[in-house]
Image: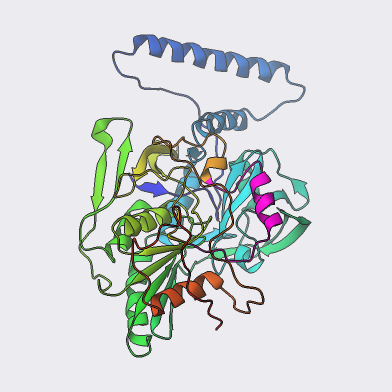
Amino acid sequence: MRKWLLAPVIGAGLAVAAIGVTAFALPNNATAKKAEVLQHLDLFADILSKAQANYVTEFDTSEAIEAAINGMLSSLDPHSSYLDPDDFKDMQTTTSGEYGGLGIEVTGQDGFVKVVSPMDGTPASRAGIKSGDFLTAIDGKSIVGLPLNDAVKQMRGQVGSAIIVTVVRENVEPFDVSLTREVIRPEVVTAKAIGDVGYIRVTTFNEQTVKALDRAIEQVRKDAQGGLKGLVLDLRNNPGGLLEASIEVSSRFLNGGEIVSTRGRRESDSKRYNAVRATRFPDNLPVVVLVNGGSASASEIVAGALQDRDRAVIMGTTSFGKGSVQTVLPLGESKGAMRLTTSRYYTPAGRSIQGAGIEPDFDVSPVRLSEKDIADMNARAARFSESALPNALENDQGAERRPPHAPADMPPEGYKGEDYQLDQAVALIKAGKAVPGATNAMATAPTAPKPVTP
């Protein structure tokens, strides 16, 4: 069974199909519990029967049952869901690195569809959809209050067909965005040399990521002017993907040892994952990892491993905070599968980032924020993070997300560059200050390098 660290993807979509409750399993010594479950199943059947007989209009029983199943799973946590056979196939295709759709990662929040991250080079990214946006209508029809899977289903369609989504963004009037559905072939890794510093961006963790990363490392080593001095690994707005891919990516920077551990409901479910044998990035070269609020799950595993093992400096803003692992459980031929949260994960130091996220060593904002901006951020009832999602798992260690604050480093007045966080990461390496563990942004404000304007 494949381990996932992924939120719903609007690609081919995650629609649901009708199934029936046929059986359930409980421990042999759970007779009383079994009787209670049977009683509730009988209640469900009675309610369904009465609704069929008395509702004001006829309705699709299969759709009603699907909604009930997904309601049950979503009440457990935001990442558990049912996949019909088509959805299951779509999910398998997604991890192979190619699928059809819009190229946008979403989750549900308070009845709204919320954008986790657009994928680079996709219709959503090119149209300017951003992390934290809310999608409220499709082709003029409201999707507010719809189950997430139903909203995703409406976003599916034939490749080449047009769709209009209504976007709600903070401090901006709602606006429509026109998109054209296409086959998504996301460029999972991009690379370039910035003088003598390598830059590698990883956009997702799928079956193509590791090979693409290996090629990218070789590319920046060849292209660096005068020899490679260090590397910036950009995981910003990377929503995650396969657990196995995150372990292999981490292995490119670690010489053995633990990368992550998982703990499930039973002690026997606990597992530690160590670095696998791989061609590694040279130990003597510094690494800066860029993260932000769109960096989730598999991205956080990599960032947490390199931070705890003193292999990299983390720069940017607090990550999303998804510290759980989902297992895809096939339900048999023609029944699809169930994606279920089966464990929490922990960094090598044993910390859970669930709801709290990865705190950067260098707290750097991509934009200059005023005092009013900070006040507005603190006044929001729902922040863009795992902890803000309905029914999110609690952090079992009591860790909490750092509240919105004035970043230690922001672009100066008149900054003319395109990417301040990247500029600062490159400057940190060039200044010889990318030293793991040298700065703790939670304890003291770091002394950031001087701004670099390309």
65 or 320, which is in the foreground?
320
Q: State left or right for residue 35 relative to residue 263.
A: right
254 or 79, which is in the foreground?
254
Residue at 65%, 38% in the rendered image: 110
Quadrant containing the N terminus is top left
x and y, in percent, of residue 30 in the image: 33, 13
**Farthest bottom residue?**
226
306 relative to 39, above or below: below
Quadrant containing the C terminus is bottom right
* First to last magenta residue range: 363-385
179 relative to 387, above or below: below
358 relative to 446, above or below: above
Residue at 43%, 86% in the rendered image: 195
x and y, in percent, of residue 305 in the image: 32, 55
235 or 157, which is in the foreground?
235
161 or 306, which is in the foreground?
306
x and y, in percent, of residue 418 in the image: 59, 76
378 relative to 121, above or below: above
Q: State left or right for residue 46 relative to residue 230.
A: right
Image quadrant where residue 261 sits: top left
Residue at 59%, 13% in the rendered image: 46
x and y, in percent, of residue 385 in the image: 55, 47
Magenta stretch encompasses residue 395: no
Q: Is residue 31 something that shows in the picture? A: yes
Q: State left or right for residue 154 relative to residue 314.
A: right
Image quadrant where residue 327 sits: top left
Q: State left or right for residue 13 relative to residue 190.
A: right
Magenta stretch encompasses residue 367: yes
Residue at 76%, 47% in the rendered image: 141
